[in-house]
Amino acid sequence: MNTHRRKHLKRGRAKQRPLLMPVDRDREQVKQIARELAQTIEPLLSDNCHSYRPGRNCDGARAQVATLEGPITALDIRNFFPSIDHQRLQRQLNRIDPEWWYRLWPWIPSSGLAMGVAFSPVLSNLYLHEIDQRFPNAVRYSDNIVVSGDPRPLIRQLGDLGLTVHKIEQPPTRWLGQPL
């Protein structure tokens, strides 16, 4: 039985971003699971993570960037959601409660995380939680990061998670659609 329906969201001129939406019969169940997961993971997250969290937003992320000292670099992770490694993510969830993976599994695609599923943003924050902890000199909103000082250790750590950076701006003039 199919648990997703595919939809494409226009992005830029020719690009389209695939979205996987839970089928109607599952939508409310997936939203409820996402709320419970967010309540479980939220207390663990770092203050320098601003995405998909209650009371946090782009404005707060930009305000925190303004407090960073020294030279800053903006990084953007390439194809973040589709690049998330299931085995790593499962290990992270198992540290919290092994039951989570089995509750989420019916709606997790064969690779990465599906954009359009209510719990994917929460899981993406968990996936980058280690980065947020190791780099207190960085501010993150989803797959957009601003780091003060040398960005190379952060880029290497992202590589260790199977992620690549496709855009580096030093010094950045804009971040999250606004001037810095």
Image: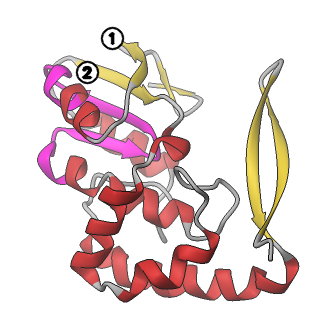
Sequence-wise, which precedes: disc 2 or disc 1?
2
Q: Cα distance, mark 2 to mark 1?
A: 7 Å
Q: Which mark is residue 119?
A: none
Quadrant (top left, top right, bottom left, bottom right) of the C terminus:
top left
Q: Which stretch did the figure color magenta? A: 133-154
> Which residue lies at the image location 61% right of the left edge and 76% below the top edge?
106
In the rendered structure, does residue 151 fall within the stretch colored magenta?
yes
Relative placement, left or right, of 34 versus 93 is: right
Residue of label 2:
72
Q: Are marks 2 and 1 in contact (CB under 8 Å)?
A: yes
Relative placement, left or right, of 165 versus 57 is: left
Residue of label 1:
170
Quadrant hosting residue 75:
top left
Where residue 4 sits: x, y (%)?
77, 66
Label 2 Cα crowd, 10 Å radius (few <14 / some 14-19 / many 20+): many
Amino acid bearing label 2: Ile
Amino acid bearing label 1: Gln
Label 2: state its secondary structure. Answer: strand
Where residue 176 sits: x, y (%)?
53, 34
> Which residue lies at the image location 21% right of the left edge and 54% below the top edge?
130
Whether 51 is drawn above or below 117: the answer is above
Q: Residue furthest front?
A: 1
